[in-house]
Image (tube, rainbow, N blue to C red):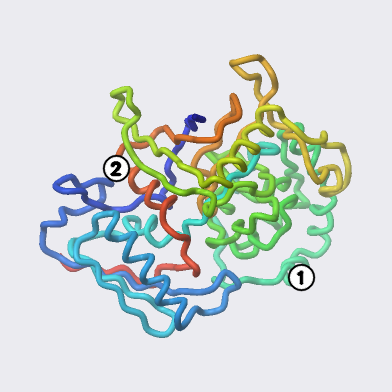
Amino acid sequence: MFVITRGILRPVLAACAAFGAMAFSGACADPASSGQTTVVLSARHPSGQPAIGAVLETTQEILLRRLQAAGFVNPVLTSTDSEITITVSGVHESDDFRGIVASGAVRFRKVLGVTVPQTAEDGGVAPGPPVWPTLAEVRSKLGAVYEAADAIDVATVAITGVSVTSAELDAFAGLSPYEVAVLPYGIQFAVGQITCEMLDARPIGAIEDPTQRAVACDEGYKYLLDVAKVLDSDIADAQAGDDGFGLGLGKVDLTFSASGAGKWEALTGEAYRNDGESMLSGPGVTGIPANPACAATELSSVDGSAVCRVAIVLDNQIVSAPWVERASASAAIVGQFNEADARILANQLRSDPLPVVLEFVAVDSVA
Protein backbone atom coordinates (compact mmCIF):
# COMPACT_ATOMS: atom_id res chain seq x y z
CA MET A 1 0.00 0.00 0.00
CA PHE A 2 1.15 3.49 -0.84
CA VAL A 3 0.74 5.78 2.16
CA ILE A 4 0.13 9.41 1.27
CA THR A 5 1.35 11.75 3.98
CA ARG A 6 1.36 15.54 4.33
CA GLY A 7 -2.37 15.58 3.57
CA ILE A 8 -3.72 18.94 4.68
CA LEU A 9 -7.41 19.63 4.23
CA ARG A 10 -8.07 23.05 2.79
CA PRO A 11 -11.02 25.21 3.83
CA VAL A 12 -12.86 24.00 0.73
CA LEU A 13 -13.05 20.59 2.41
CA ALA A 14 -14.40 21.90 5.69
CA ALA A 15 -17.92 20.90 6.57
CA CYS A 16 -20.09 20.75 9.63
CA ALA A 17 -21.27 17.35 10.73
CA ALA A 18 -22.25 15.15 13.60
CA PHE A 19 -21.87 11.43 13.96
CA GLY A 20 -24.04 10.17 16.79
CA ALA A 21 -23.40 12.53 19.68
CA MET A 22 -20.04 13.68 18.31
CA ALA A 23 -20.04 17.04 16.58
CA PHE A 24 -16.97 18.22 14.66
CA SER A 25 -15.47 21.06 12.60
CA GLY A 26 -15.36 23.63 15.37
CA ALA A 27 -17.67 26.22 13.83
CA CYS A 28 -20.61 23.82 14.00
CA ALA A 29 -23.47 24.30 16.38
CA ASP A 30 -24.92 21.44 18.39
CA PRO A 31 -27.45 19.82 16.00
CA ALA A 32 -29.77 19.23 18.94
CA SER A 33 -29.95 22.97 19.59
CA SER A 34 -32.72 25.14 18.18
CA GLY A 35 -32.31 27.16 15.06
CA GLN A 36 -32.33 26.79 11.32
CA THR A 37 -29.95 27.67 8.50
CA THR A 38 -30.93 28.38 4.92
CA VAL A 39 -28.37 28.37 2.12
CA VAL A 40 -29.16 29.66 -1.37
CA LEU A 41 -26.84 28.53 -4.16
CA SER A 42 -26.61 29.53 -7.81
CA ALA A 43 -26.00 26.65 -10.21
CA ARG A 44 -24.19 26.90 -13.51
CA HIS A 45 -22.48 24.64 -15.96
CA PRO A 46 -18.64 24.80 -16.05
CA SER A 47 -19.04 26.81 -19.27
CA GLY A 48 -20.82 29.50 -17.26
CA GLN A 49 -24.36 28.88 -18.53
CA PRO A 50 -27.14 28.66 -15.90
CA ALA A 51 -28.12 25.11 -14.95
CA ILE A 52 -31.80 24.21 -15.18
CA GLY A 53 -34.05 21.17 -15.41
CA ALA A 54 -32.92 17.58 -14.89
CA VAL A 55 -29.33 18.52 -14.04
CA LEU A 56 -30.63 20.45 -11.00
CA GLU A 57 -32.52 17.37 -9.84
CA THR A 58 -29.36 15.25 -10.11
CA THR A 59 -27.42 17.90 -8.20
CA GLN A 60 -30.02 17.95 -5.43
CA GLU A 61 -29.82 14.16 -5.07
CA ILE A 62 -26.03 14.26 -4.71
CA LEU A 63 -26.18 17.16 -2.25
CA LEU A 64 -28.77 15.36 -0.12
CA ARG A 65 -26.56 12.25 0.11
CA ARG A 66 -23.58 14.42 1.07
CA LEU A 67 -25.54 16.29 3.73
CA GLN A 68 -26.83 13.06 5.23
CA ALA A 69 -23.38 11.42 5.19
CA ALA A 70 -21.91 14.51 6.88
CA GLY A 71 -24.55 14.37 9.61
CA PHE A 72 -26.53 17.53 8.94
CA VAL A 73 -29.92 17.38 10.64
CA ASN A 74 -33.23 17.54 8.72
CA PRO A 75 -31.81 18.60 5.35
CA VAL A 76 -34.41 19.81 2.85
CA LEU A 77 -33.57 20.88 -0.71
CA THR A 78 -35.65 22.79 -3.23
CA SER A 79 -34.83 24.41 -6.56
CA THR A 80 -36.15 27.29 -8.64
CA ASP A 81 -34.77 28.29 -12.03
CA SER A 82 -30.99 28.03 -11.63
CA GLU A 83 -30.88 28.18 -7.83
CA ILE A 84 -30.90 25.49 -5.13
CA THR A 85 -31.98 26.18 -1.55
CA ILE A 86 -30.76 24.04 1.35
CA THR A 87 -32.44 24.18 4.75
CA VAL A 88 -31.00 22.34 7.78
CA SER A 89 -31.59 22.39 11.51
CA GLY A 90 -29.06 24.21 13.68
CA VAL A 91 -27.02 27.37 13.26
CA HIS A 92 -24.25 27.12 10.68
CA GLU A 93 -21.93 29.33 8.63
CA SER A 94 -21.04 29.24 4.93
CA ASP A 95 -17.69 27.55 5.63
CA ASP A 96 -19.60 24.62 7.13
CA PHE A 97 -21.07 23.87 3.69
CA ARG A 98 -18.05 24.36 1.44
CA GLY A 99 -17.13 20.70 1.40
CA ILE A 100 -20.73 19.80 0.64
CA VAL A 101 -21.20 22.12 -2.34
CA ALA A 102 -17.73 21.67 -3.86
CA SER A 103 -17.77 19.88 -7.20
CA GLY A 104 -15.78 16.95 -5.83
CA ALA A 105 -13.81 16.24 -9.00
CA VAL A 106 -10.64 14.34 -8.01
CA ARG A 107 -7.54 14.21 -10.20
CA PHE A 108 -4.21 12.47 -9.56
CA ARG A 109 -1.38 14.29 -11.32
CA LYS A 110 2.40 13.99 -11.39
CA VAL A 111 4.13 17.16 -10.19
CA LEU A 112 6.44 18.49 -12.91
CA GLY A 113 7.81 21.57 -11.15
CA VAL A 114 7.43 23.73 -8.06
CA THR A 115 8.03 27.44 -7.56
CA VAL A 116 7.36 30.03 -4.87
CA PRO A 117 5.14 32.78 -6.31
CA GLN A 118 5.57 36.49 -5.83
CA THR A 119 3.12 37.88 -3.26
CA ALA A 120 0.89 40.68 -4.51
CA GLU A 121 1.65 44.02 -2.86
CA ASP A 122 -1.95 44.57 -1.80
CA GLY A 123 -2.20 41.01 -0.50
CA GLY A 124 -5.57 40.51 -2.12
CA VAL A 125 -7.39 39.36 -5.22
CA ALA A 126 -8.73 41.81 -7.76
CA PRO A 127 -12.53 41.96 -7.86
CA GLY A 128 -14.39 41.08 -10.98
CA PRO A 129 -17.75 39.78 -12.19
CA PRO A 130 -18.32 36.01 -11.86
CA VAL A 131 -18.33 35.63 -15.62
CA TRP A 132 -15.98 33.54 -17.73
CA PRO A 133 -14.16 35.76 -20.24
CA THR A 134 -12.58 34.39 -23.38
CA LEU A 135 -8.81 34.13 -23.64
CA ALA A 136 -9.00 36.62 -26.51
CA GLU A 137 -10.64 39.16 -24.20
CA VAL A 138 -7.93 38.73 -21.55
CA ARG A 139 -5.19 38.97 -24.19
CA SER A 140 -6.74 42.19 -25.46
CA LYS A 141 -6.89 43.60 -21.93
CA LEU A 142 -3.20 42.81 -21.27
CA GLY A 143 -1.88 43.76 -24.71
CA ALA A 144 1.88 43.44 -25.09
CA VAL A 145 2.19 42.24 -21.50
CA TYR A 146 0.49 38.99 -22.49
CA GLU A 147 2.94 38.41 -25.33
CA ALA A 148 5.85 38.96 -22.95
CA ALA A 149 4.45 36.42 -20.51
CA ASP A 150 3.70 33.90 -23.25
CA ALA A 151 7.37 33.97 -24.27
CA ILE A 152 8.70 33.10 -20.78
CA ASP A 153 10.76 29.90 -20.74
CA VAL A 154 8.44 27.76 -18.61
CA ALA A 155 10.79 24.76 -18.61
CA THR A 156 13.57 26.87 -17.07
CA VAL A 157 11.17 28.17 -14.43
CA ALA A 158 10.25 24.57 -13.57
CA ILE A 159 13.91 23.50 -13.44
CA THR A 160 15.12 26.44 -11.34
CA GLY A 161 12.00 26.89 -9.23
CA VAL A 162 12.18 30.66 -9.75
CA SER A 163 9.23 32.49 -11.28
CA VAL A 164 9.56 35.64 -13.39
CA THR A 165 8.57 38.84 -11.60
CA SER A 166 9.78 41.65 -13.86
CA ALA A 167 7.88 44.92 -13.57
CA GLU A 168 6.49 44.65 -17.09
CA LEU A 169 4.29 41.78 -15.84
CA ASP A 170 2.62 43.77 -13.04
CA ALA A 171 -0.64 43.99 -14.99
CA PHE A 172 -1.27 40.31 -14.17
CA ALA A 173 -1.72 41.27 -10.50
CA GLY A 174 -4.90 43.12 -11.47
CA LEU A 175 -6.67 40.17 -13.07
CA SER A 176 -9.77 38.65 -11.51
CA PRO A 177 -9.91 34.93 -10.64
CA TYR A 178 -12.05 34.25 -13.71
CA GLU A 179 -9.52 36.01 -15.94
CA VAL A 180 -6.65 34.06 -14.40
CA ALA A 181 -8.55 30.81 -14.96
CA VAL A 182 -8.55 31.16 -18.76
CA LEU A 183 -4.81 31.84 -19.03
CA PRO A 184 -2.58 29.03 -20.39
CA TYR A 185 -0.99 26.88 -17.70
CA GLY A 186 2.50 28.10 -18.59
CA ILE A 187 1.62 31.71 -17.83
CA GLN A 188 -0.20 30.80 -14.59
CA PHE A 189 2.91 28.93 -13.42
CA ALA A 190 5.73 31.18 -14.62
CA VAL A 191 4.40 34.68 -13.87
CA GLY A 192 5.19 35.54 -10.26
CA GLN A 193 2.54 38.24 -10.06
CA ILE A 194 -0.10 35.51 -10.37
CA THR A 195 -0.18 34.49 -6.72
CA CYS A 196 -1.48 31.41 -4.94
CA GLU A 197 -4.23 33.59 -3.50
CA MET A 198 -5.37 34.33 -7.04
CA LEU A 199 -5.10 30.71 -8.14
CA ASP A 200 -7.03 29.45 -5.11
CA ALA A 201 -9.83 31.91 -5.93
CA ARG A 202 -10.37 30.57 -9.45
CA PRO A 203 -13.89 29.24 -10.00
CA ILE A 204 -14.53 25.56 -9.37
CA GLY A 205 -13.92 23.55 -12.51
CA ALA A 206 -11.03 25.73 -13.68
CA ILE A 207 -8.56 22.81 -13.74
CA GLU A 208 -10.97 19.90 -13.99
CA ASP A 209 -10.09 18.85 -17.56
CA PRO A 210 -7.87 15.76 -17.10
CA THR A 211 -6.36 16.07 -20.57
CA GLN A 212 -4.81 19.46 -19.84
CA ARG A 213 -1.83 20.33 -17.64
CA ALA A 214 -2.70 22.56 -14.71
CA VAL A 215 -1.34 24.76 -11.93
CA ALA A 216 -2.42 24.60 -8.28
CA CYS A 217 -0.98 25.56 -4.91
CA ASP A 218 -0.03 23.85 -1.67
CA GLU A 219 1.17 25.82 1.37
CA GLY A 220 2.06 28.83 -0.76
CA TYR A 221 4.01 26.90 -3.40
CA LYS A 222 2.93 26.79 -7.02
CA TYR A 223 2.82 23.33 -8.54
CA LEU A 224 3.02 22.63 -12.28
CA LEU A 225 0.91 19.50 -12.75
CA ASP A 226 0.93 17.00 -15.58
CA VAL A 227 -2.23 15.68 -17.23
CA ALA A 228 -4.34 13.57 -14.86
CA LYS A 229 -3.75 9.84 -15.30
CA VAL A 230 -6.03 8.66 -12.47
CA LEU A 231 -9.51 10.13 -11.91
CA ASP A 232 -12.31 9.97 -9.34
CA SER A 233 -14.03 7.45 -11.60
CA ASP A 234 -11.10 5.08 -10.90
CA ILE A 235 -11.87 5.08 -7.13
CA ALA A 236 -14.16 2.23 -6.12
CA ASP A 237 -14.36 3.16 -2.43
CA ALA A 238 -12.90 5.47 0.22
CA GLN A 239 -13.16 4.65 3.93
CA ALA A 240 -12.14 6.87 6.84
CA GLY A 241 -10.44 5.73 10.02
CA ASP A 242 -7.65 6.63 12.45
CA ASP A 243 -3.95 6.57 11.73
CA GLY A 244 -3.42 3.37 13.72
CA PHE A 245 -0.65 4.92 15.82
CA GLY A 246 -2.76 6.59 18.51
CA LEU A 247 -1.81 10.08 17.33
CA GLY A 248 -5.39 11.21 16.81
CA LEU A 249 -4.86 11.69 13.09
CA GLY A 250 -7.28 10.61 10.41
CA LYS A 251 -6.69 8.26 7.52
CA VAL A 252 -8.55 7.57 4.29
CA ASP A 253 -8.06 4.16 2.67
CA LEU A 254 -8.59 4.23 -1.08
CA THR A 255 -9.77 1.21 -3.02
CA PHE A 256 -9.37 1.49 -6.77
CA SER A 257 -11.39 -0.28 -9.40
CA ALA A 258 -9.67 -3.06 -11.34
CA SER A 259 -8.68 -0.68 -14.12
CA GLY A 260 -8.01 2.14 -11.64
CA ALA A 261 -5.54 0.03 -9.65
CA GLY A 262 -3.53 -0.52 -12.80
CA LYS A 263 -3.56 3.19 -13.61
CA TRP A 264 -2.49 4.12 -10.06
CA GLU A 265 0.34 1.57 -10.10
CA ALA A 266 1.49 2.91 -13.47
CA LEU A 267 1.38 6.53 -12.23
CA THR A 268 3.27 5.83 -9.01
CA GLY A 269 5.78 3.74 -10.96
CA GLU A 270 6.29 6.60 -13.40
CA ALA A 271 6.82 9.02 -10.51
CA TYR A 272 9.15 6.66 -8.64
CA ARG A 273 11.36 6.06 -11.69
CA ASN A 274 10.93 9.65 -12.95
CA ASP A 275 10.10 8.33 -16.41
CA GLY A 276 9.90 10.71 -19.34
CA GLU A 277 11.96 13.12 -21.37
CA SER A 278 13.96 15.92 -19.79
CA MET A 279 12.73 19.50 -20.10
CA LEU A 280 14.79 21.80 -22.30
CA SER A 281 15.07 25.57 -22.54
CA GLY A 282 12.70 27.18 -25.03
CA PRO A 283 10.14 29.99 -25.35
CA GLY A 284 6.78 29.40 -23.73
CA VAL A 285 6.05 25.71 -23.15
CA THR A 286 8.02 24.51 -26.16
CA GLY A 287 10.70 23.09 -23.86
CA ILE A 288 8.25 20.79 -22.10
CA PRO A 289 7.94 17.49 -24.00
CA ALA A 290 4.73 15.53 -24.43
CA ASN A 291 5.85 12.98 -21.82
CA PRO A 292 8.01 15.02 -19.45
CA ALA A 293 10.13 13.83 -16.57
CA CYS A 294 9.61 15.95 -13.47
CA ALA A 295 12.06 18.77 -12.75
CA ALA A 296 11.24 18.82 -9.01
CA THR A 297 12.73 15.67 -7.47
CA GLU A 298 13.98 14.42 -4.12
CA LEU A 299 16.31 11.55 -3.28
CA SER A 300 14.40 8.46 -2.22
CA SER A 301 14.96 7.30 1.36
CA VAL A 302 14.72 3.74 0.05
CA ASP A 303 17.42 3.60 -2.63
CA GLY A 304 18.65 7.18 -3.15
CA SER A 305 17.12 7.57 -6.61
CA ALA A 306 15.48 10.81 -7.74
CA VAL A 307 11.72 10.50 -7.26
CA CYS A 308 8.76 12.74 -8.08
CA ARG A 309 5.61 13.81 -6.28
CA VAL A 310 2.05 12.84 -7.14
CA ALA A 311 -0.59 15.44 -6.29
CA ILE A 312 -4.13 14.57 -5.30
CA VAL A 313 -6.24 17.50 -6.51
CA LEU A 314 -9.82 18.01 -5.34
CA ASP A 315 -11.48 20.71 -7.45
CA ASN A 316 -8.85 23.51 -7.47
CA GLN A 317 -7.12 22.44 -4.25
CA ILE A 318 -4.16 20.13 -3.67
CA VAL A 319 -5.14 17.80 -0.83
CA SER A 320 -1.71 16.20 -0.66
CA ALA A 321 1.41 15.97 -2.84
CA PRO A 322 3.75 13.30 -1.44
CA TRP A 323 7.04 12.02 -2.79
CA VAL A 324 6.59 8.54 -4.25
CA GLU A 325 8.87 5.98 -2.61
CA ARG A 326 7.62 2.99 -4.60
CA ALA A 327 4.98 1.86 -7.06
CA SER A 328 1.77 0.53 -5.53
CA ALA A 329 -1.72 -0.59 -6.54
CA SER A 330 -3.40 0.76 -3.38
CA ALA A 331 -3.19 3.93 -1.32
CA ALA A 332 -4.00 5.51 2.03
CA ILE A 333 -4.05 9.22 2.79
CA VAL A 334 -2.66 9.98 6.26
CA GLY A 335 -1.90 13.51 7.40
CA GLN A 336 -2.58 16.57 9.45
CA PHE A 337 -6.33 16.12 9.87
CA ASN A 338 -8.47 14.33 12.43
CA GLU A 339 -10.85 11.41 12.03
CA ALA A 340 -13.85 13.69 11.53
CA ASP A 341 -12.11 15.53 8.70
CA ALA A 342 -11.13 12.15 7.24
CA ARG A 343 -14.82 11.25 7.07
CA ILE A 344 -15.51 14.41 5.11
CA LEU A 345 -12.68 13.68 2.69
CA ALA A 346 -13.76 10.05 2.28
CA ASN A 347 -17.30 11.23 1.55
CA GLN A 348 -15.96 13.59 -1.12
CA LEU A 349 -13.87 10.85 -2.73
CA ARG A 350 -16.69 8.33 -2.56
CA SER A 351 -19.54 10.47 -3.85
CA ASP A 352 -20.29 11.43 -7.42
CA PRO A 353 -18.89 14.78 -8.56
CA LEU A 354 -21.50 17.46 -8.99
CA PRO A 355 -22.53 18.02 -12.63
CA VAL A 356 -22.69 21.78 -12.03
CA VAL A 357 -20.71 24.50 -10.29
CA LEU A 358 -22.40 25.93 -7.18
CA GLU A 359 -21.74 29.36 -5.71
CA PHE A 360 -23.14 30.91 -2.53
CA VAL A 361 -25.87 33.53 -2.97
CA ALA A 362 -26.95 33.81 0.66
CA VAL A 363 -26.53 32.03 4.01
CA ASP A 364 -29.05 32.96 6.71
CA SER A 365 -29.29 31.48 10.20
CA VAL A 366 -32.00 31.89 12.82
CA ALA A 367 -31.12 30.89 16.38
**Res. 245 in view:** yes
What residue lies at 38% left-to-right and 65% top-to-bottom?
A: 62
In this picture, residue 175 sits left or right of residue 169: left
**Crowding at mark 1 (Cα within 10 Å: few <14, some 14-19, many 20+):** few
* Rendered image quadrant of residue 301: top right
Q: Nearer the viewer, mark 1 or mark 2?
A: 2
The residue at the point 24 percent across, 55 percent down is 71
The residue wearing badge 2 is 340
Q: Secondary structure at mark 2?
A: helix
Question: On screen, 294 above or below 63?
Answer: above
Residue 291 locus on image (x, y percent): 78, 42
In this rendering, the answer to whether 321 lies above or below 10 is: above
The spot of residue 164 in percent (x, y) is 75, 42
Q: Residue at x 49, y 32 (%)?
A: 4
Residue carrying label 1: 136
Residue drawn at x 62%, y 71% as measured from the top left:
132
| In this rendering, position of residue 185 left or right of residue 311 | right
Q: Quadrant of the C terminus?
A: bottom left
Q: Secondary structure at mark 1?
A: helix
Marker disc for residue 364: none
Place residue 49 in its image quadrant: bottom right
Q: How crowded is the residue under tag 2: few (<14 C-alpha within 10 Å), some, or many (20+)?
A: many
Q: Position of residue 297 (x, y in %)?
A: 68, 27
Q: Amino acid at mark 1?
A: Ala
Amino acid carrying mark 2 in the image: Ala
Q: Position of residue 283 (x, y in %)?
A: 87, 47
Residue 122 seen in the current view: no
Q: Residue furthest front?
A: 258
Q: Earlier in the sequence, mark 1 or mark 2?
A: 1
Of 302 and 159, nearer the camera is 302
